[in-house]
Image (spheres, rainbow, N blue to C red):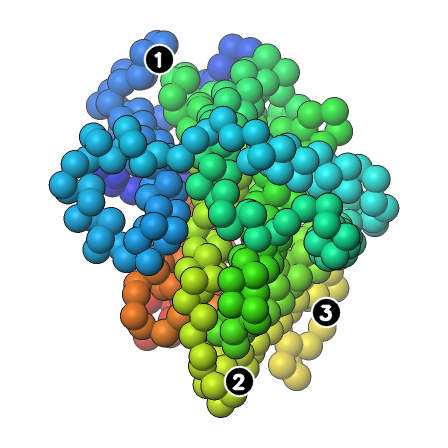
Amino acid sequence: AARPRFRARVFGFWVEPPRPDSHAHPLTPSGRSVDWETMGNWSADSGFLPGREAAGPLALIGATIPAVILIWYANFHLDGSLVALVQELAADPVGWFLTKWPSCTDPEAWSWILGFMVFELALMRLVPGKEFKATLTPAGNIPIYTANGMQCFLITLVAFALGTQYGVFEPARVYDKFGEIISSLNVFSIFFCFGLMFKGYYAPSTTDSGTNNNWVLDYFWGVELYPRVLGWDIKTFTNCRFGMMYWAVGILCYAAKQIEDIGYLSDSMFVSVSLQLIYIAKFFWWESGYWCSMDIQHDRAGYYLCWGCLVYVPCMYTCHAYYLTKHPIALGAPLATFIFLVGFLAIWANYDADRQRQQFRMCNGECTIWGSKPRMIVAEYTTENGITKRSLLLASGWWGIARHFHYVAEITAAFCWGAPGLFDRFMPYLYVTYLSLLLLDRAYRDDARCSGKYGKYWDEYRSLVPYKIIPFVI
């Protein structure tokens, strides 16, 4: 029977990611063909030129590249007003793109981008850490990582502080040049993703690779699940050591710009930046858990994932702090404290849920969750190589409230680091709106993936935990 699959309708076309265990290209190790019964047999996409099936990804690529520029422009030039942005575009759309698009050849922007990349790549290789073995892949491989994310995060923050103190660079300039940085990252990422596609065709790192028989789909969704180049893990670099690390460094640069402009750091910026740094620190403390998440285990290294982490994360995930740079709102101690405490508790709940599940798996279910023996489902599944494996599905604690209740905590935290901007503009809430849609989509994708993987065992699990995110709602 066909496995349930996530599908989304984009600009009138169906878009869905390929299975991570699919193999079809004659250059891949297995040489097996993809079963496309769930994709629909309404387009022929086996040649060089893309057919209708590629129209959705092409539309997304065409929309996302200018989207990040538009977000920056509204923040930098239009006081964060999306309404004013729409009015400018409606008045002269062609002229806007011809005259307002920031340069993608700015030497200063490129020096920062490449310097930051080299620094983080060096830390990945040189900083010691424990060996971490992730979960078994669909093709039967076990990815091995060096768990040094927290060390690299702390070293990056120290390097930022020392570089700022001794005048090695001016962090406020990142705010001023952010349009050029995003424009340059767009160019870098477009070519980078082409390189990943061709590497997947001709030199895949593992057997967890395959093609869709269509270069547009391969470019968008990716070819390899675990690409590595000269020992560097590509997805760890793009997702963690560039995207997430820039998130931390970027908001500190914007805070520095506010201090340069007005002579002090507003309490609204302090609350927002502090909460985000706590969240990012939580991420790197838990990075080994992220290596077992959907981003790593299911999404291949293509435009969808890598452009998102190299370009979209630096822009969208920092847009609220970018907005606050020029809007130093005085919250007052009571409101600032309230927002901070709610955000901190939400981050803790999100972390505790991840910790709870990780502890449950490490002790093979022999533990207590909230003072009681955990409810669980012992689920069996079969790998691509025909090997039967077993997983434990936790149905207690946070994971007994809803299958993804930790998403509520994550969305609450994101709301709290936009809330210091109050409600004059929608810009501070652009990220949390996006995040809510992303996590809703991810909850459905994960449900479909687990249903296909575990079959009847997933049905049993859903009977114990019937709601995806919010009890009695969804």
Name the residue type under label 1.
Ser
The picture places residue 468, in percent across and down from the top left corner, at 40, 64
Label 2 to label 3, Cα distance in Å?
39 Å
Q: In which quarter of the image is the C terminus?
A: bottom left
Name the residue type under label 3.
Glu
Residue indicated by mark 3: 366
Q: Quadrant of the N terminus?
A: top left
Q: In this view, does 355 lie above or below 40?
A: below
Label 1 to label 2, Cα distance in Å?
58 Å
Residue indicated by mark 1: 46
Residue 275's image quarter?
bottom right
Query: First in sequence: mark 1 or mark 2?
Result: 1
Residue 14's image quarter?
top left
Residue at point 31%, 36% (across, down): 100
Residue at disc 3, secondary structure: loop
Residue at point 59%, 48% (across, down): 246
In this rendered view, identify the residue nearer to me: 386 or 193: 193
The picture places residue 46, in percent across and down from the top left corner, at 35, 13
Q: From the viewer's perspective, is 46 left or right of 316?
A: left
Around disc 1, counting alpha carbons within 10 Å, would you say few (fewer than 14), some (14 to 19), or many (20 or more)? few
Residue indicated by mark 2: 337
**Residue found at the very far left of the displayed protein:** 91
In this rendered view, identify the residue nearer to me: 261 or 446: 261
Residue at point 38%, 18% (across, down): 214
The picture places residue 185, in percent across and down from the top left corner, at 50, 34
Of the two numbered discs 3 and 1 in the rendering, the one whose residue sits closer to the viewer: 1
